[in-house]
Image (spheres, rainbow, N blue to C red):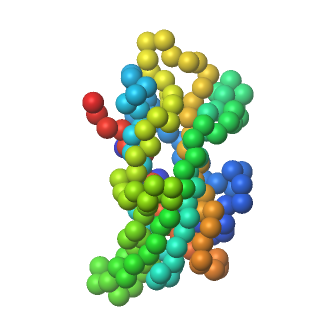
């Protein structure tokens, strides 16, 4: 599965300012809709120790016949990410602060984040829905970090599919 690196320099005000994660058929295609995308792996780092970022993830269906215009959001989740003392440098003395605690806001469940039931995504069944594709949008919707000249938050997001 491909990983996507996203940087946030400001709070994501609405979906038009969110980062798009294009799900490819190797990441989102499936035969059985019950076993499509099942988990999302999130890792990353922040500019400061002790920062908390609330990340929103939205899945949206797009109409491929209309240049991938968004039809509507079909699922939405929020996650809190907080940095610990571990830094990104090998000697732990330089770089950003690694997110050590990532959990679902509504359930408090930690990684891996399960996202069962997000619906069709590049449907590879023998009788697929045509003209529809799925994208994932991510946005930093809240933070206690003060946005500066560079990114305050860098994330690596990996959609995963569990083999049945």
x, y percent for residue 107? 45, 55
Going by the image, does 55 lie left or right of 71? left
Total numbered labels = 0
Going by the image, does 150 lie left or right of 155? right
> Is 136 above or below relative to 108?
above
Q: Residue at x 56, y 18 (%)?
A: 129
Going by the image, does 31 lie left or right of 18? left
Between 130 and 162, the one nearer to me in the picture = 162
Give the quadrant of the N terminus. top left
x, y percent for residue 17? 69, 56
Give the quadrant of the C terminus. top left
Given the current orientation, which residue lies at the most extreme top position? 127
> Is 100 above or below relative to 128?
below
Given the current orientation, which residue lies at the most extreme bottom position? 93
Q: Residue at x 50, y 36 (%)?
A: 118
Going by the image, does 1 lie left or right of 46? left
Between 101 and 8, the one nearer to me in the picture = 101
Q: Residue at x 46, y 72 (%)?
A: 82
Q: Which quadrant of the figure has residue 39?
A: top left
> Is 19 above or below relative to 8?
above
Residue 89 seen from this side: no
Q: Residue at x 54, y 56 (%)?
A: 78
Residue 1 seen from this side: yes
x, y percent for residue 139? 60, 57
x, y percent for residue 42? 42, 57
> Is 153 above or below relative to 48?
above
Between 4 and 46, the one nearer to me in the picture = 46
């Amino acid at each position: 599965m491909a990983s996507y690196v996203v940087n946030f320099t400001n709070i994501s005000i609405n979906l038009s300012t969110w980062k798009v994660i294009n799900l490819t058929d190797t990441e989102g295609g499936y035969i059985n809709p019950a076993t499509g995308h099942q988990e999302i792996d999130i890792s990353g780092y922040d500019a400061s120790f002790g920062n908390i970022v609330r990340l929103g993830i939205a899945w949206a269906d797009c109409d491929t016949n209309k240049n991938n215009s968004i039809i509507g959001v079909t699922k939405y989740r929020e996650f809190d990410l907080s940095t610990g003392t571990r830094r990104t440098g090998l000697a732990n003395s330089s770089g950003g602060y690694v997110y050590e605690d990532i959990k679902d806001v509504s359930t408090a469940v930690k990684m891996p984040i399960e996202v069962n039931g997000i619906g069709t995504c590049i449907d590879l069944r023998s009788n697929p829905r045509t003209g529809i594709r799925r994208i994932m949008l991510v946005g930093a919707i809240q933070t206690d970090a003060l946005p500066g000249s560079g990114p305050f938050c860098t994330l690596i997001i990996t959609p995963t599919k569990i083999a049945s």
